[in-house]
Image (cartoon, rainbow, N blue to C red):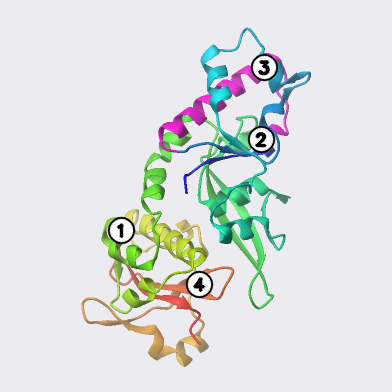
Amino acid sequence: MDLEMVFNELSARTLAPDISTARQWMSELISTMREAQRCGLKGLRTQTDFHNMVLAENYPLPRWRNDNEVNREELTFLRTLATKTPLSVDIPDKEIQIKVENPGCELSLQGIQTEEFKVSYYLETLAISLNSESLWKSSCIKLELIQIDENWQLIEESVEVIHASQKNHVLEHADWIKKREQTAVVDGLELWNRRAELFSSLEFCPRVSQQIESLVDPKMLRQVVRKLFELDELSKNWIDGALDLDNLPSKVSPESESRLKEFREQLNIQCLDGKKRIFSLHVRMTPGAWRLHFCTELGPGKIIIGYIGPKIK
């Protein structure tokens, strides 16, 4: 599936104070989108009709398109920009479409539900904003994900969506976008065979081979890829000292003392060097009851993956 930009309509809630500022915002937005296209993103997803957006009082986008002071190249770009409305239209992965349309799963920003960032999160792609507020000057947006798991328990966690409101943000994400395109694996066997190429700062215990190779569910496959990607980035940036787990977008938990005692044998996993280590730290994959267990005992620059599968019981 081609990667696409997702327009953040919350960035259009603030009208420009004057027409000159509106022109500036549009120039910056188009510069951002053009750079994103150069990096490989093919089009733009929007919640409502992007081409009827209001930029300033009495200055909607149709008036901008007929403004003689607007750069002609910007007008040409916008005319040729492929847009999809509504956000969930033509998502070929039905599992992702179900997540996107699931009312039991919410993403919120400062208490406001946002469908645009929800789509960006599940499609693992770039959210694009008008540079209309200080909130959109960040290249990464932190949100709260709230959903019901398979046991009807409420789960709340912080997540991040990569974001751009200016060209430099896209350049900052260029390597991420390239790697995101490269990680579009079709099944667990391909993922396992490409592990060294995709996750150079991770080491995998022998038993993980079968766990990854058996992955066929696209929904869980993308979740596993995402978590491994996050851990690989964390490991690459771990230069010295103790690993700061707060830098991982996903929430990390250790096993409780009672579970460590009860499941010690299952958590005591043999590594490539033949040594057995306790894999207490884990991230969860939701919805579902899957866990990814890892160990940081090797020190900076190398995280060990010990278990990927359903919660150990």
Determine whether the residue tagged by mark 4 lies in a helix, strand or loop.
Answer: loop
CA distance separating discs 3 and 4: 51 Å
Circle 1 or circle 2, nearest the eye: 2
Closer to us: 156 or 89? 89
Query: In the rendered image, which residue does mark 2 sit on?
Result: 11
Q: Main secondary structure of the magenta part?
A: helix
- In the image, residue 296 sits, relative to residue 239, either above or below, namely below
Query: In the rendered image, which residue does mark 4 sit on?
Result: 253
* Start-end of magenta stretch: 11-40
Whether residue 79 appears in magenta in the rendering, the answer is no
Circle 4 or circle 2, nearest the eye: 2
Q: Is residue 239 visible?
A: no
Q: Residue furthest right?
A: 58
Circle 3 or circle 1, nearest the eye: 3
Whether residue 32 appears in magenta in the rendering, the answer is yes
Determine whether the residue tagged by mark 2 lies in a helix, strand or loop.
Answer: helix
Q: Is residue 83 visible?
A: yes
Specify the amino acid type for callout 4: Ser
Q: Which label's residue is closer to the chain start, 3 or 1?
A: 3
Specify the amino acid type for callout 1: Asp
Query: In the rendered image, which residue does mark 1 sit on?
Result: 240
Residue 291 image position (x, y, % from top left) = 48, 74
Residue 62 image position (x, y, % from top left) = 70, 20
Residue 72 image position (x, y, % from top left) = 54, 12
Specify the amino acid type for callout 2: Ser
Mark 4 Cα within 10 Å, few/some/many (few <14, many 20+)?
few
